[in-house]
Structure formats: structure tokens, C-alpha cells
Image (spheres, rainbow, N blue to C red):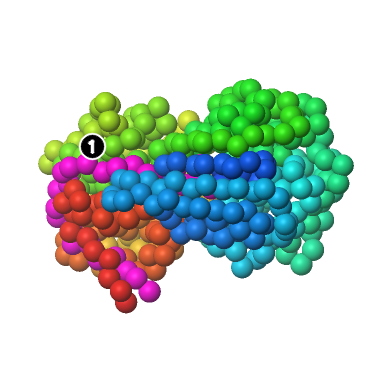
Amino acid sequence: MDRIRIRGGNRLKGEIPISGAKNSALKLMAAALLTDQPVTLKNMPRLADIEAMADLLMQFGVTLNIRRGAGLGRSDTIRLHAASIESALAPYDIVRKMRASFQVLGPLLARHGEAKISLPGGCAIGARPVDFHLKGFEAMGARIDLADGYVVASAKDGLKGATFEFPFASVGATENLMTGAVLARGRTVLRNTAREPETQDLGRCLIAMGAKISGLGTNEIVIDGVEKLSGVEYSVMPDRIETGTYAIATAIAGGEVELIGAQAETNGALIDLLTRVGTEVTQTNRGLSVHRNGVRPIGVGVTTGVFPAFPTDLQAQFMALMCVASGASRIQETVFENRFMHVPELARMGADIKVEGDVATVTGVAALKGAPVMATDLRASVSLVLAGLVADGDTVVNRVYHLDRGFERLEEKLSGVGADIERQSA
């Protein structure tokens, strides 16, 4: 099993290309099931989760071709063609690897009229139940049964439009019901919907395929069902979590890095926070420039939330920065209940963190010390890498298969701007 070794102390300088957004790309791949015409997705990240979704779609009879980009920053292009759906079974062995696999439920129900989907897996960062997905499809006329760890869903006469209000703004449920509603009979009104940029990206792709959707980016999305969707060529939005991760890496290590392709409008909460910490973030004609001089970061507090609040997927990375900040900071996690699993590993490196319920209080220390640590989930993994960038001595991060699910060629991108980092085979 691979591991990553980081020797801290190097300032970062140069440019990092930002890959396509994983959390958008996976849902766009699932949306290819909605049409019998080819769907071509550009700016695709090269990740383990993308490969897992490709394996799942091929189970349904989707033909898939990948054109690999050559060199760092050259993205992949994937062509998917669901001419017919030969199977509607999403087996446990595939779905357990990645929660986003559950997003095929909407497209399969909408076009095929039935689906049998294993209950999902992914990172162990909380229950993340699928109740809202299922209740929403029931409101649209689907029959839902649970049997032997599978969701067995059917809508033999097709889905029908309905009004459904989410108890809270669930990203996955919003996106799943959107993809079901685009081929449903009549109008669907979804209330208290997610406003995340990736959800909007999915909606824009569906509109390009011929869907009738209004209200993207608001708390209410209205969808008028159509009989058929067409193929499309669509470019995936830049990954705002990767953007934030490398911006925080620059803030923690110091230096100046331009993030090529990064978008200011999808990273507003992070930019505001980094400015308060003492890091300069400016928009360029190619993306965002991040700069921090030798002054120690300032400790500031943050509460995670749904967009446009600070994203939970950057909480672990920001905590790593606060570990070496001047003063104390209060970090409240309101989205997932088990998302402080990185705290004991950061403590092994000398961090001073106290957790009470959903609040972590971080008292910055003058220096972290390199240590062997273990990744527990995707975002926690990269927080340990960021801590290693500034720690004295060597940090070795084990179980980095978590990283490969969501960060494309992480060690190459960081070494390209001066970090002393390498992947090692155990």
C-alpha cells in the first residue's frame, strides 16, 4: 500500500493547475444514463472515484471511451453512450467504494422505470442517510422497497411531477431528484434545495441536454419534464475543494502560488477567511493568486455549512492551518457528525486541539513535528499532508488510497511548486 512522505520547511512558488470538480463530474457521468445519445464530458479529473463510477455505468451497458490528457494539467475527456440500459443493478461491491454511486437511482428510474441499488458506502464520516432521496421519489410515484441492503425502486408507468420540500438542503438528494424529474410527467417543484456550485453545474448540463429547469442556485428549483433528452458535449467546472486545498497549502507553507483555472465566485467563503488569516488572494486572468509572507497566520474561527457558507470538505485542511496560527480558533462542524477523525493524527504531530461535540478548539503552536500518521478519510488525508508541509522533519501519511479518490496527482502538483514530497511504495 502506498504512502506519502513530506519533509516540511519549503515555501511554495509557482503554479498549480486545478482539475475538474470530482463532485460535479461523478453526477454528470450518472446523467449520461438519461439519454440514448452520446454524452462527452471534458475537463474530467483522473481519480479512483471516476474509475469506480465508470465501472458501475458499464454494468448498465454504457459504452465508455476515455481520451487521456498528456502531462500535468491536461485533463481527460470521457465519452459515454447509454444506447440502451441492459441492467439496472448497482451491486454492493461497486457502490460500497463511493457514495456518489447512489446518484444513478434518479436517471435509472426516469428512463428505465426500475433500479436496484446497494445502500451506499464511501468515507466513514457520518450516517448521511438516503431517506430524503427515497421519500422524494415516492412523492413522484415510485414504489420503494428495502431488501438485503438494497433499494429496490420501480416506476413502471414513469415518474410524475410533484412538490417536495427537503428537511434540510441535501446536495445528493437535490441532485438525484433533479435527474429523476427531468423526464417525469408534469412539473416538479423542489424546495429547500442545495445551492452548491456542483449542483448548478449538473443543472446547466441537463439544460444543455434539453431539460427545462429554473431556479438553479436558489432554494427552489422548478423542473418541467420533457419526453427525451439529447446528447451533449460539456466541460466540468473547476474543483473548488482542490482550489481551497492548494490555497490553504500556500497559506500554511508560505510563498506565492497561482491556481490556474480557479474561480473566485465559487470560493468566496474561503477567500474571506484566508484574508482574515493574513493571506492575500487576488484574481488573475488565469485563476487565483495566493500569497503569504513569513508572518505567522492569525487564528480565526469558522463554522461549516451549506453553500455559500464555508464547506465541510475544507474543514480538515483549515484546521491544519490553524494548528500553526497565532492564538486560538474555534471550528464548528455542522454538516457531518464524525468529521474530526483527523484530530488525533494532527495531535501526533504536536497540534493542540480539544474537541467537545461538534466544536474543536485549536490553540496554535509555534511548530509541528513530523510523524507517521494514518489517513482516515478523503479530506482528513490531505490535511495531514498540509500539516507535513510546515512540520519539522519527515511526515509519512499512510493509507493514501483515500487521497487518490479525490486529489489528482497531489504529490506532483505540490512538488511542482517546491514542496519536498514523494509517493513511496510500502
Residue 266 in view in this figure = yes
Is residue 15 on the magenta stretch? yes
* Front in this rendered view, residue 276 or 48: 48
Q: Quadrant of residue 211?
A: top right
> Above or below — where is 311 with respect to 149?
above
Residue 420 image position (x, y, % from top left): 17, 59
Q: Is residue 385 above or below residue 2?
A: above
Q: Residue at x 26, y 55 (%)?
A: 412
> In what quadrant of the picture does the C terminus appear?
bottom left
Q: Amino acid at mark 1?
A: Glu
**Left/right of residue 252 with respect to residue 201 in the rendered view:** left
Residue under the point 65% across and 65% down = 92
Along the viewing direction, whichever of 147 and 251 lies nearer the viewer: 147
Left or right of 397? Residue 179 is right
Give the residues in magenta: 1-27
Residue 216 higher or lower than 27, as above or below: above
Residue at 67%, 60% in the rendered image: 90
Residue 186 relative to residue 69: left or right:
right
Q: Position of residue 315 (x, y in %)?
A: 41, 46
Residue receiving disc 1: 258
193, above or below 426, in the image: above
